[in-house]
Image: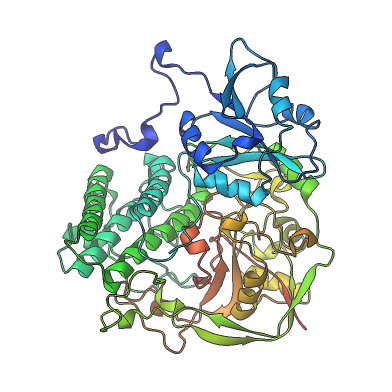
Amino acid sequence: MFYPSDSSLSNSPLTSRSNTPSSVSDFQLTKNFLLSPTLLDIQFLRDFSKKLDKGSEDRIVIHVNHSDAFTSGWIQEAIKSLPCVDLEGKYWEKHNVDESCYFTETCEGVEFDEWLKVCTKTGKLTSATQALNIFASVGLRSIFGQSSPCGESTLYVLERPSISFPPLDLTSPWGVPTKQEWKDVWAAWDLVTLGMIPSVMLHQKPIDLRHKCLFYIGHIPTFLDMLMARALNQSNSEPYFAQIFERGIDPHVDDPEHCHRHSEVPTKDEDWPALGTILAFRDRVRGRLLALYDDLASGKRKINRNIGRMLAMTLEHEGWHIETLLYMLIQRAGTGTLPPPGFVTPPWEALSAQWDVSHTAPSSSTVTLGPATITFGHDDCEGNDFDEGVCDQVEGHEFGWDNESPSRQVQVGKFHAEWRPISNEEFYAWWLNRKEIGLPPSWVEGEEEIQVRTLYGPVPLGVAKHWPVLTSYDMLCEYAKSKGGRLPTEPELRLFLDTYEVGFEGGANVGIRNWHPVPATTGLEANGGRGSNGGVWEWTSTPFNTHDGLSPTEHFPGYSIDFFDGKHHVVLGASYATIPRLAGRRTARNFYQHNYPYPWVGGRIVYDA
């Protein structure tokens, strides 16, 4: 653990499994399991996944058939190069499950060929997207998937990571969050703050335009406590924390002295609350929230629109900050920030080779859209929350942020859009002759080559060349102009995403499926052009501003209106670290200053028709 002096962390789930056994008797061999294709079933895997220790090197290998026209002969050779698992020369014990079976590694038993025989059984035909959703539903994650030469089946290597997000509950995905949703977000937040920030970085700023790391560890529970107290007409649990942790900073990039209203924080490191004190407060606030859920379930307190909005807003606020803190921390990955614990380090060499082989350019680089009429936003006016006939309408309601409401019709003209965002490789070729514009902060200039930042440390540009490039609006706007195009307006990008983006449930790289971008997949005929942009937000040329009917939030005063300053632009989509609840709501909007280069935002070129 990185903070051994804090006794409050002794029971943290991040420390429950030591990397080094304390004695020989504590040592357990890594567990490997080979599953029959017929066992790709949510009910079975939900129980079976518990055989793997969370965050360990335990692995499941399963062969998934996508088509009746499959063969299994390729598996024998594929096994030899599967990363993150060693299967060659091992012996296996067969376990029957009804008419199916699985194999566990053992000292004596049958050889690997016995499992190959059961792989010829088709089981239920399952698409790659369906397989990913099944894995996510039971807390498993695909480390690597090796497809057959013709793509009719895939061999998956799975881990049980320390955290995961399941697909959205489509019955009410944007209603009042469930307790489990809170626990999933808390697990992610604790992993980032307690597992990736070493103690020496607590009082450091990974980027100059934001607070030190410790601020955010205190801000999240303080924000929840303050909004909960306000909605329930109660007192804050810790008034001093409300003074220093209420609100962070977003100063103007070109004039850092200019900043919206924010908390006044201590100027000296020794004047900040200790980490253990903050975490004890965090636990009390979480207990307060869970007690509210118990009161709502028992009928002691009645849910209403105001309380429901507070719960939705505070959960999503924590989701936003997971991503905000990560895009800060990535600037120190390899020089301070620790990799995500409980996840295997990506097999970069194998992934890079696979991306190179599978990278297929669309038959045409652009698609034509419009003219069209699209709906912006949804009807969720906070100003009506106490109105008679509205106050008690909570079940089935879709909550959002103030800038998402109300719904309104927008006309979109005809335009041409690139199928995929600008890649690192494309931007690098252009940048070589324009180095005076500076280096995108998502890159690192090494001694011999440009590298791309990841949360595991920088990787060669050759590994990340197909990923979307991440940089400021200004840089990407210059690139687009040089190609005879421009960056899209918000309505144009919204139309493209509505038409072609598949989302988390469609296999998109969001919701921490990975801790890094992947190549974009849109534009291929096999799926009607639908796919993923690789797991990044996308810039629009539309300034973030007010619109008719906007009712500014009273729960979080200034959330939107403080940034109607002509400097912030709307960004749409989601990154690889955006929680599914935010990534999946098409009305959700993000916003950054046009010259702010740190967020995980890429750009897509469009052309006038």
Q: Quadrant of residue 237?
A: bottom left
Name the residue at the right extreme.
Answer: 363
Q: Position of residue 430 (x, y in %)?
A: 76, 63
User: In the rendered view, does 216 fall on the left or right side of 133?
Assistant: left
The answer to which of 463 and 31 lies nearer the viewer is 31
**Considering only vertical position in the picture, is 512 above or below 64?**
below
Q: Position of residue 155 (x, y in %)?
A: 69, 36
Q: How is the image coloured?
A: rainbow
Q: Quadrant of residue 604?
A: bottom right
User: In the rendered view, does 175 fall on the left or right side of 355?
Assistant: left
Residue depicted at x 80% and y 36%: 71
Name the residue at the front extreme.
Answer: 99
Q: Position of residue 62 (x, y in %)?
A: 64, 34
User: In the rendered view, does 188 fall on the left or right side of 354?
Assistant: left
The answer to which of 276 and 84 lies nearer the viewer is 84
**Considering only vertical position in the picture, is 61 above or below 267?**
above
